[in-house]
Every structure is written in C-alpha cells, then in structure tokens.
Amino acid sequence: MIIEILRNRVNQAIIAAFGAEYGEIDTLVVPASNPRFGDYQCNVALSLAKKLQQKPRAIASQIADNLNVTSICQPPTIAGPGFINFTLLASYLETQLEKIQRDPRLGVEQVKNPQKTVVDFSSPNIAKEMHVGHLRSTIIGDSIARILEFRGHQVLRLNHVGDWGTQFGMLIAYLREAYPTALTTANALDLGDLVSLYKKAKLRFDDDEEFRHSARQEVVKLQSGAEDSRHGWELLCNQSRREFQTIYNILDIKLTERGESFYNPLLPGIVEELSRQGLLAESEGAKCVFLEGFTNKTGSPQPLIVQKTDGGYNYATTDLAALNYRIQQDKAQKIIYVTDAGQTNHFAGVFQVAQRAGMLPEGVEVKHVPFGLVLGENGKKLQTRSGETVRLRDLLTEAVSGAKKDLEARLVIENRQETPEFINKVAQVVGIGAVKYADLSQNRTSDYSFSYDKMLALQGNTAPYMLYAYVRVQGISRKGNINLDNLPSRSVELEQPEELILAKHILRLNEVLGEVEQDLLPNRLCQYLFELSQKFNLFYDRTPVLKAPEPQRTSRLVLSDLTARTLKLGLSLLGIEVLERM
RNA sequence: GGGUGCGUAACUCAGUGGAUAGAGUAGCUGCCUUCUAAGCAGCGAGUCGUAGGUUCGAGUCCUACCGCACCCGCCA
C-alpha cells in the first residue's frame, strides 16, 4: 500500500543520510493533516532534532535529498518547522487504479499468516427477548467477523447463548406450576408468552420463599437429567431459538450456536484442574481463585468464584471451560469476545486465572472487545417508560416501516411508479442498513445515547447516503447503457481536482482495512465510506461522465465503477446490502 | 472505598503526539427542462471538564481534582 511504500523510502533515506543505526526508528509517515499539505506527511525530522543536534529543517532536507520517490510523487517539499510533504503524481494514481480495476479484492491484501479465530458475539439469553443492547454485540461482532474473514482468517462465529443457569430452575418451576402440559407437549407457547412467563416467574421467585426452594430443586433435577425438566428446558430453548433466528435472518447474521449448556459437562474438570494447579481456595463456602491485583470493597483480594456454596457452577467456570475448549478442541489462536464494557473486570479475571492455570499456550491471544452501554435520555442504561428495554424486533420493524413511508412520499413527489416488491425491498435494505450503520458508525468503546430518531434517520451520515452514491453510479450505467464490468483497462486519466481527490481516497481502502483489522473499530471503515461517498458526490455534481468527451468519459466511468465497487465491498464488511435503484 | 471508561460546537459524535480541532443533525441562504435533490454549495456556531506536568510540539501521554456512567462473592 502507498503509505508503506513511502515509509520504506523514508526509512532508506534516513539510513542513507544518517547511518544504519537510525534504521529502526519510526518514520512517522502519516496521511496529511490537511489537503493543502499534500497527501502524506513525514514528521520524523522534528523527532530527530535532539538526537542529531541539528535543526529539524536541515534534517528534513537531508532526508529529502536521499529520497527516491520520483515515480510516486512530486518532489517532496519541506514546510513549517520541518515537515516533509508528499503529493502523489496523477500518473502513479492512474497506474494504481488500473491495477485494482482488474482485482475483485480492490487491492486489499490477504494476510500472510491466517489465524484460526473465534469471534464470540450476540449471546442473547434464552427466554428473554433480544433488546437494543444485543444489537451492538450482534452488529459489531458480525462486522468484525466479516472483516477478519475477508482478510483471510479462518473465523468461527460462536453464539454463547445463555441457555443454562439458575434462571431455568425458576422458569421450569413456574411452567410446572402454571402450565403443566407445557412440560409434556411440544410448541404449546410462543415467545410472547415466554417473555411474560419469565416476568411472572421472576415475580414468584422474588416474592415466595417456597417457590424459590422448588426453583432451586428444579435446577438440580435439570442438571441430573430428569426427563420432564429436560423437556421443559428444551421447549424454552427452541421457542427462543426460533425468535432469535427471525432476527438473525432480518439482520443477515450467521452464527453457530454453542450455548453455556454445551460446556456443562466440562465444568467439574475445570475446578479440578484449578485445584491441581494449587489455585483453588475456599471462602465463605464457595470455591474460588483469588485474583492478583484486584481488591473488593473491603480492600481484601477479590475472588473469582468457580463453584458456589450449593455446589453449582457459575459463568466464570463456564467462561474458563469455553476458553479451554476453544483452544484445545477448536484450535483457536485468537479468541475475541464482543461484550459490553461492563464485563471488562470479569474478563480480566477470567484471563488471569486461565493464564495462571496454564490454559493459555504461547501464541494464543484472548481479547475482550468491549463496547459502550446503550443509554437512554436520562444518561442511564436504556429503558422504556414502562421500565423495559426497547425490543429489537420493534426497532427493526419501525426502521423498515419508516423507510417505506419515506420512500412512498418520494415516489409521490417524483411521480414514480414502482412495484410493491421494489418498495418493500428498498425499505428493507434502507431501514436495516440505517440501523446497522447508526450503531457501527459510532466508536464502539463509547457509551451510546439511544435515539429512535437517530437510528431511523435517512439523511446525512447514514447508510442511505452511501447507498445513494452507489445507486448514482448504477444510474449512470443504466442511462448510458454501459456494462461497468467491461470497461477497458489502462484508460484512467486524472485531471480535475475532483477526480484526483476521489482517486486518492479509493486507493486508501487497503490502508484503512488494515487499521480496522488491527483496532477492531468498524467506525473507521464507516468514516472511510462516508468520505468516499462525499467525494464521489462532489465529483458527480461537478464532473459530467456520460456527456464528457473521450478519453475522459471512459476514465470517469472507471472511477465511478471503482467507487461503487469500493462502497459495495466496504458496506458488505459492515453487513449492509446495496441496491441498484432506490 | 477500589477498579474501569467517558467529559470536544445548541444536539449526537469523529479525531493516528504534529501545522489553523472536524463531521452529521438542527437553523439560515442559494442550486432540480441536466448522470436520481436520500444530493451539492455557502453562513453562523469551540476556555477540547479544571489545574499542573512530560515534550521541539498535547484534544491525544502522566498526575491531581470535579462531574457522569459501569463493575467490585456465589447473575452474565
């Protein structure tokens, strides 16, 4: 990629000017902070001033004298206190564009050493409905998985659903009490019932000591494999699974379900192993590992509890078992957990214990990829007025129907006739795209002020803005009756500033995706695609394509096609579809 | 009390130790017989929470403080 080439050249120039001992220093080549300084800038001269006992500008000019970049950019200029500025040559850009024109990957490299990578994301709880909080994990995790897959990694997408634990005792106990037939009949309830059932069960659990007791016994029965308890559990899971699947279908999310229950048989082994390693301690009746570097409210060492007083296991044990399984059985080299930032401490504890227990072999990387909470207008965790979280299903329905309303209003204004199939398809892609983009375009680590209006917005920095840029290119192709797949190569000629600006941005995809893969921040990709669309819209506004004489016409068609292909590829990595017309 | 994260334009947010801190929204002004106006151009809007420090250079790194959120023993 261009920036790497420049870094290499600067590195060589530094060695030539000041000797091999300066070969290891960072060249500090970065994209220019302002277009009037060119395309890239090198800041290294300022940082060398002290070491070399020379003025930065003098250092800069010695580096520039030794730079071999004549085929790439104009002669570098030295500006301000000692910046070296690079402006790429049109001829170089043309060659690069012609190269990626023939490449379905648009110049994006595959990694040289693919890694077996687990991405653990989404992870809703059985018998609860997915709410907007799950959107972040689901959308961000999916995008990260798509990006890693595209880079050539072997990705296992795991849905660590909450399908085990004490809440099932409560649910099954309530089923047994209120709907005894449910334990023996298949499909007697739908999820709507299940959610209200969860609430009722919770009420009973909170209010009634006797019910609490039978709920606990139900857990034991379930764990020991009692037929009817097992049946109730499966019923609950299946009902939930169906509802999750409809949402995953709408969002086009592919996931392998491997819930907490999967690791259940492995839990005793984990505790034994911890004991064998001499890490296990007993405290207030619970078996735990005391963490290093963590203290609790009273200032004493904080435990990670792996076996409760009643003998049951909890999520820490399950997470350790899952970690171990993914390394031993799945052969994962990298494990990524996409969960909210509130679990940071928990994962730090789990990773520490895994490390101390020798479960993390050399070369295996575990990474918590946190995202901020979804907050309501009060600045606290989001809840609706009735005290419930916003249902994901409702949000998606609202997004699609909002997009449909908007489209229908346009059709009236523009006096267009479209089929219901067209309208529904466009509404679907625009609505779902808008919701996904609204989430992904925000830095994942910051908390998220949820707003229906923002999620459903269709103007400005939103998915439809980029879809629209894409559609404009397809419109050119239709109007001119041109097959964009058959454009001649070696036909790019860049002259107008809008063309150059667009071309330079197209060529940065590889660089941006590299950063996104490194930092796992999809909002960087969103930013890139938004800027690409902005630059294309300016080009579209000021530079006629079809009416331009040759060779500009073909050259601009290539630029348009590359823009569209970049948008399509970039959006696909965000899990967003494109449209030919809208 | 301890830990983690966050305080940037009216609002929602970007911002990689570099030059004069950027978008979008909202408001105002122009631009559709032209490749789709879900667009383009322009205008106004800032003590980057406060105070120190490191550095040639700090919104960015360090320390303290203020404010907010989240986590801190048997939920995940």
Image (cartoon, coloured by chain):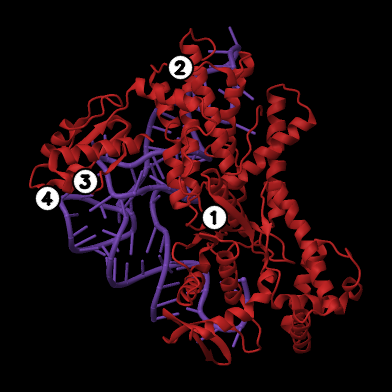
Chain colours: A red, B purple
Which of disc 1 and disc 4 is earlier in sequence?
Answer: 4
On the image, numbered disc 1 is attached to which residue?
A: A116
Residue A493 left/right relative to A394: left
Q: In this figure, which residue is indicated by the disc labeled 4? A: A50
- Residue type, label 4: Lys
Q: Is mark 2 on a helix, strand or loop?
A: loop
- Could one spot residue A306 in this view of the protein? no
Marked residue chain, label 3:
A
| Residue at the image point whose x is 62% and y is 50% from the top | A452
For mark 3, what is the residue?
A23
Image location (x, y in percent) of residue B55: 17, 55
Q: Of circles 4 and 1, which is in front?
A: 1
Looking at marks 4 and 2 on the same chain, the residue that comes earlier in the sequence is marked by 4
Are tags 2 and 3 found on a single chain?
Answer: yes
Q: State the mark number for residue A490.
A: 2
**How far apart in space, not on screen, are marks 3 and 4 (Cα)?**
17 Å
Q: Is mark 1 on a helix, strand or loop?
A: strand
Query: How far apart are the alpha carbons under marks 2 and 1?
Result: 39 Å
